[in-house]
């Protein structure tokens, strides 16, 4: 599986992404997965009856991405980027020793990694991370084709000692970290940041005892969502 040789897969995916961006002539974010697909000679068609978000197929020699009707542009971008990853999977796997191109789960994992890195390329993401002080809204503005959630998880690749949590309608729905232990429950400073956000519904930052906690509301009509980041490094 991917975790067994994550480094090799990661290098191969990075190379594939760099090749795609170069072929599409994309030199800065945001990255349009649709534009990259077109540059690679991949057609995109919409099928309103599609049961899944997307799939890839071929018409003759032409690769084709079929996407479901989707009102969120970021989801459509993600779907196209993921399907491109599936189309390129044999190429990516060829560069990794032991890459079994027939394994569905592996192909899915690699396609997800490819999609994340295509919409949020490593060097550009790190650069914007640094200039913006890791601000979610600034990152979203620069990488507008990626969802807040995708950007939130990608922050875990930008620096060590971090835990990211997502709350929907006031309830914790996902929590991931890159620092091993400490993810089981919210720290008091995280709860405090949530309480402050509740009163004014604008970003809030608390720094104490070598820990920095930032929370952003990313609400949509009829749906409250918050993204909370705890970072052990207060330098940013
Ligand atoms: Zn897939």
Image (spheres, helix red, strand yellow):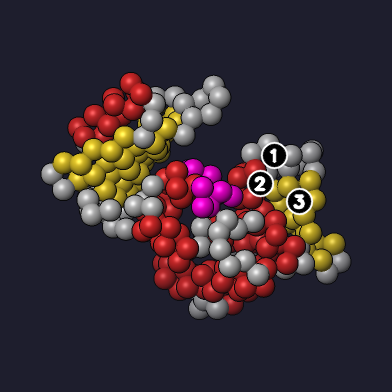
Image spot of residue 104 (x, y percent): 60, 58
Residues at circles 3 and 1 in contact by the CB criterion of under 8 Å: no
Looking at the image, the residue that sits furthest to the left is 209
Query: In this figure, which residue is indicated by the disc labeled 2?
Result: 76
Q: Can residue 64 be seen by looking at this rendering?
A: yes
Q: Secondary structure at mark 3?
A: strand
What residue does disc 3 label? 66
Neighbours of disc 2 within 10 Å: few (<14), some (14-19), many (20+): many
Q: Quadrant of residue 157?
A: bottom left
Circle 1 residue: 70
Q: Quadrant of residue 39?
A: bottom right
Q: Residue furthest front?
A: 131
Identify whether 184 is placed above or below 101: above
177 vs 223, left or right, is left
Instruction: Judge from the rendering whether residue 130 lies leftward or rightward of residue 148; answer left or right.
Output: left
State how many labels appear.
3
Question: Picture coordinates of residue 123 (x, y %)?
Answer: 45, 66
Eye-nearest disc, 3 or 1: 1
Q: Whole-Å distance between the Cαs marked 3 and 2?
A: 11 Å
Neighbourhood count class around disc 3 (C-alpha, 10 Å): few under 14, some 14–19, many 20 upward: many
């Amino acid at each position: 599986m991917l975790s067994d040789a994550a480094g090799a897969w990661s290098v191969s995916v990075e190379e594939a992404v760099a090749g795609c961006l170069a072929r599409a002539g994309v030199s800065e974010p945001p990255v349009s997965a649709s534009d990259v697909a077109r540059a690679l000679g991949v057609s995109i068609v919409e099928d309103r009856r599609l049961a899944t978000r997307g799939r890839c197929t071929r018409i003759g020699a032409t690769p084709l991405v079929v996407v479901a009707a989707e009102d969120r542009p970021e989801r459509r971008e993600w779907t196209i980027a993921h399907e491109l990853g599936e189309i390129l999977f044999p190429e990516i796997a060829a560069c990794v020793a032991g890459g079994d191109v027939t394994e569905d789960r592996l192909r899915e994992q690699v396609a997800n990694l490819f999609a994340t890195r295509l919409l949020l390329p490593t060097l550009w993401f790190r650069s914007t991370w640094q200039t913006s002080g890791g601000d979610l809204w600034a990152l979203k503005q620069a990488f507008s084709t990626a969802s807040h959630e995708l950007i939130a998880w990608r922050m875990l690749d930008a620096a060590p000692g971090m835990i990211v949590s997502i709350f929907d309608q006031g309830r914790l729905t996902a929590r991931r970290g890159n620092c091993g232990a400490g993810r089981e429950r919210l720290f008091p400073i995280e709860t405090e940041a949530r309480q402050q956000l509740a009163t004014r519904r604008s970003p809030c930052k608390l720094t104490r005892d070598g820990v920095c906690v930032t929370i952003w509301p990313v609400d949509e009509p009829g749906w409250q969502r918050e993204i909370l980041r705890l970072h052990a490094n207060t330098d940013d």
